[in-house]
Amino acid sequence: MADAAVTFLLDNLVQLLKHQASLISGAERDLDLLKQDLETLNSFLRKAAKKPNKPEEFRDLEKRIRDVVYEAEDTIDSCIAAAYKKSSITRFFGGFAEEVKSLRENEVIQMVDKVLKFDATTMDNIPDAQRKDSPTKPKLKTIREENVVGFEDYENLIVEYLRESKEELDVISIIGMPGLGKTTLAWKIFKSHFVENEFPNRIWVNVSQTPDIKNVFLTILKKFTSEDISNDILDTTLIDMVQSYLKDRKFILVLDDVWNMEDWNSIRNVLSKSNYMSKVIITSREKSVGDKASQPRKSYELPFLSGPQSWELLQYEAFGKPGMCPDELKVVGECIANNCHGLPLSIVVIGGILVEQDAKNEDISAKKEAWLKVSNDVKKFLENDKKNQVLDIVELSYNRLPDELKDCLLYLAVFPEDYEISAWKLIRLWIGEGFIQGENLEETAEENLKDLISRNLVMVVKRNSKGGVKTCRVHDVVHAFCGSKLLQEQPRFFREMKCVNKGFVPPLSDIDKPRRLSFHSGLEIFFTSNEKKKVSRVRSLLFFKESPNFPEKHTPTMVDGMDLLRVLESGLIKLKQIPKGVTKLFHLRYLTICVDNLPTVAEAFSGLWNLQTLVVYTKQESFTIKANIWKMIHLRHLKTNQAITQVANAKGNSEGCSSLRTLSRISPEICTTNFFNKAPNLKRLGIQGKLAILFKTNSLGMLNQLEKLKLVNTFHDSESQRSMSFPELTSWFPTKLTMLTIVGTRLDWKHMSTLARMEALQVLKLKDDAFTGMSWEAVGGGFHSLHFLLVEDTELVIWKALNNSFPKLRHLVLRQCKRLRDIPDAVVGSLEKLDIEHLSATAVDSAKKIAEKKIANQGEKEASKFKLTKGAGCESS
């Protein structure tokens, strides 16, 4: 893992020597020598990564290498930051060179000597791992989406509870130790056909060990209203609003992971006991909580899996389904399953290890040998302490991770327990933190995430329309393991800021030079205390607690004294202005910020030379960017929730920004050939404003790498509508475009024929009257690659299609199409999922007929893959 820190510093040195001569003048020679030393350390660590069963002394040496690298990094970055603050052309005379020289002689050279001696006496005696031409990190396939074994009877039992008529609100408790599958069972029930058809309002809340009850109420409230409810709402007002919504509506509420009666009682206060139509399911590891919450009903205690059930689940994890295990592996496989003592989480984590072994070994004898080793490891880990079985199994899986994945997994501890993590954000954070190296950063990070999912260490919560990971989370056991492992091996890795009685526990003084601060509470207290002075070397500030009323007086100095920051994740803090010191953070690589009124992103942002990801949230309808983004050669992602109406022209850099991958959102006026010439590698683009202007140009076709495009029209006056002319040629769209979203254009449905001819288009979303008129006749063929279609907020009445109109459509979503008479049978062919919400009774009936047709054509077994989901406002005639 230390090699990531070394590689990161090496890359920074290379970039400094290449691009920032004015800041390092006089220190070039010493920096080059330091670079050579680091290359020696890196070579040693990479060589060590290929060795199995590294000795304990190596881990100690690795820790010391990391500390030396951090010290070198802090020394260099402090000097660079000081130089940058004075002036971008300030020469450091000899001071910087002396700092680097002293660092080498007193720290780095000594470490290089230790490494060379250790390498010669110890590492050379350890054989390389036996690999048959396989890469260091084999590419794993995700065997399963979600396998639930042994829960069928329990699921049926709880569904029967949900069917029961009661005279008052019914509470059902599922209890059991961590890793038994409480959440999995509750989620399976929550997503079942019965629940989705029976309960128009379905609410899932992750409660966790230290919940913010206010956030629990806000989560419930957001299910019933689209209004932007501020977090500063009075508690009494919030409680009244939640009580009002829950009083007479039929709902199912799942409260996952309730730890104590105090939390349950706080939530119970907003639930009307007289609402006999509704149901509440809670999961808890505490029997006393479950018993009291569900009175007079008894809580349901989840049992351990039997031996055959354990073996069945392990086969799902390792092979995709039972019956696929080679005869040579059955005995050892059953032994592994039995050693997991019926705990599902242990079994799925072990399954991830076996998938990894099968990816490495093609020969059945090699696979059997690898499985036997896993069996011995499992037995050895569990023979002494079965109480900590799950943690032991996670430890076993962690130890088998490639080094480049370990920090990626441990980093998940910075998020709050049970936190639903945006995959897009996580990937960019990993990159900003320096965990991902190489040229294809996003692709590598995505593969890392998929790998952790394949190993069952990370769980998928939501998938996007292309089937990719949208959000994820880690089981609380895995989360606890990551925190514990960091405390043991990398205590400086991060510090979770917990505020107790207006102070932090433990105090920051107990941790020497923390690299990251993760705020789950106590934000305002931190910025008004002396604690802030103790973290001048902190590299990341991460805020996961919404703070709509951050004290304005502290905003200007919010990042003062933190000159080495690389990551500032502050999107949940609503500021009145951008902190003054942000534009001086030379090392900043990732910035998410929320400013209520932001007319301009200042020119001073041009100096954030290292910035890779910039995300801006504002209430301003549009704003300008005076910063010269073309000078920011490392900028990869620029995202905003409002339209950028002006971007500064390139100054002294005619080549533009070849690194830019994401640009969203910009106004149509910006979309010129000259502009896109400067960003030739864009993959995601969002355009918002008067789209009539955009449709008259032909600038998008030149974006040969563009994969995702979102078009949002915000001008609906009669003049704009008259001038709206949708492009008739498919060449207007980039040839690699696979995802297209169109919002508010109010075009005639006849223009859909243009989109039908786009050969690469896989996902199409039409929202807010993107197309208008009573009839859409998709009868000319086309949409050859389309597998996801969403139509939302339209007055469409008649939709006609032929069998070849949507040959690959797998997922259809229809929302707020209240006048649509029916859904054409022609969409049935490849359809696997149909989501409907606020449709007419006749359209709902046609959806049911589609489901019946799937059964008639394919039989019960194949039709079970088809899913019809009905949301609110879907009453059949």
Image (cartoon, rainbow, N blue to C red):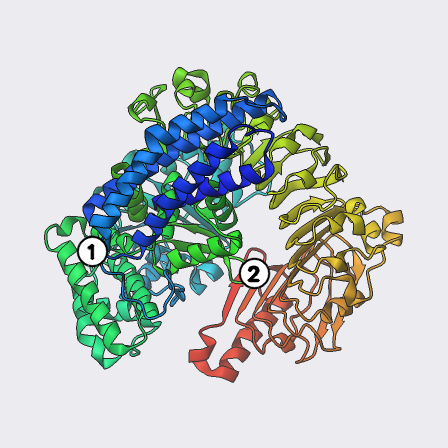
| Residue at the (78%, 60%) spot, across then down | 772
Nearer to us in this view, 798 or 739: 739
Residue 579 visible within the image: no
Across and down, in percent, residue 310 comes to 22, 66
Q: In the shown orientation, is residue 237 left or right of residue 367?
A: right
Crowd rating for badge 1 (residues with CA inside 10 Å; few <14, some 14–19, many 20+)? few
Disc 2 to disc 1, C-alpha distance: 51 Å
| SS at circle 1 | helix
Q: In the shown orientation, is residue 60 left or right of residue 109?
A: left
**At label 2, which amino acid type do we have?**
Ser
Sequence-wise first label, 2 or 1: 1
Nearer to us in this view, 174 or 141: 141
Image disc number at residue 125: 1
Nearer to us in this view, 811 or 491: 491
Across and down, in percent, residue 372 comes to 18, 68
Residue that numbered label 2 is attached to:
465
Q: Quadrant of residue 214?
A: top left
| SS at circle 2 | loop
